[in-house]
Image (cartoon, rainbow, N blue to C red):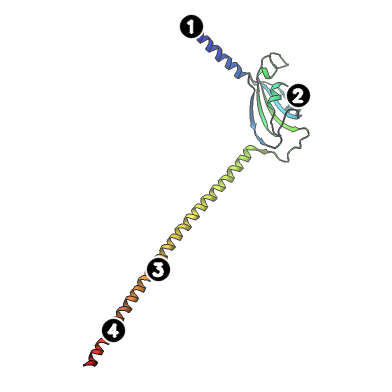
């Protein structure tokens, strides 16, 4: 019974491994910002370099010919790996496609490509027919760095503002303390003057009483 479960487990693991190996790999190596991306039905122009995953041997490259390859995306004019792997791509963007046999040439031998080969394609979108090329290509990394720099500036401004606010608050508090101290001193001096005046009045009154007493005598 244990051997049956073990066999089933090994079979399941092998199946998962095969399914994983048959997935199309899409790695965006040079991301680009754009409003208009490729979609099925577009005629696109692509530069590429194709190599065998097994040994890294190059079997074809449009770069060597100096002319990009043009085809209708999603129209079945190329291998399935290209029809699906080059969708939602910006002009100037670069991708590396890992194309298993089920997305490539299957078990057929095509020229220098052995049957059952997994292929690696380095691709670059040069243009989309009917779509104007952008005046400048905005690379995501540059855009992200610009956003980071702007965020850093905002952070420093906020920090400086907080520090300035703190200093202003401290200065205001000190001014208020000085004002209170000065006010207390003024009140104290006024009280002292009033007290002195009161004493003087008492003295005058006392002297007046003495004079009245002498007159009566």
The residue depicted at 56 percent of the width and 48 percent of the height is 154
Image x and y of residue 89, in percent? 69, 31
Q: Is residue 216 above or below residue 35?
A: below
Give whichever of 169, 91 is nearer the camera: 169
Image: 12 above or below 25: above
Q: Is residue 84 left or right of residue 192?
A: right
Quarter of the image for residue 122 reads top right
Q: Is residue 132 left or right of residue 160?
A: right
* CA neighbours of label 2 inside 10 A, class few (<14), some (14 to 19), many (20+): some
Residue at the spot x=60%, y=43% of the render?
Answer: 147
Numbered label attached to residue 1: 1
C-alpha gap between disc 1 and disc 3: 98 Å
Residue assigned mark 4: 205
Which residue is rendered at x = 49% and y = 53% of the image?
163
User: Of marks 4 and 2, which one's residue comes earlier in the chain?
Assistant: 2
SS under mark 3? helix
Q: Which mark's residue is nearer the viewer, 4 or 1?
A: 4
């Amino acid at each position: 019974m244990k051997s049956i479960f073990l066999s089933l487990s090994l079979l399941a693991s092998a199946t998962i491994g095969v399914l994983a190996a048959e997935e199309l790999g899409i790695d965006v190596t040079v991301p680009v910002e754009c409003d208009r991306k490729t979609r099925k039905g577009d005629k696109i122009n692509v530069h590429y370099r194709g190599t065998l995953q097994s040994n890294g041997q190059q079997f074809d490259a449009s770069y060597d010919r100096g002319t990009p390859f043009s085809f209708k995306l999603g129209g079945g004019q190329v291998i399935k790996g290209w029809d699906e792997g080059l969708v939602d791509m910006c002009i100037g963007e670069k991708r590396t496609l890992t194309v298993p046999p089920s997305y490539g040439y299957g078990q057929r031998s095509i020229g220098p490509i052995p049957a059952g080969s997994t292929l690696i394609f380095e691709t670059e979108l040069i243009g989309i027919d009917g779509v104007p090329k952008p005046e400048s290509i905005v690379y995501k990394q540059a855009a992200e760095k610009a956003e980071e720099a702007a965020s850093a500036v905002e952070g420093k401004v906020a920090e400086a503002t907080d520090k300035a606010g703190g200093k202003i608050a401290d200065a205001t508090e000190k001014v208020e303390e000085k004002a209170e101290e000065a006010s207390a001193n003024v009140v104290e001096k006024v009280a002292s003057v009033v007290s002195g005046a009161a004493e003087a009045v008492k003295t005058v009154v006392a002297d007046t009483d003495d004079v009245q007493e002498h007159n009566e005598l």
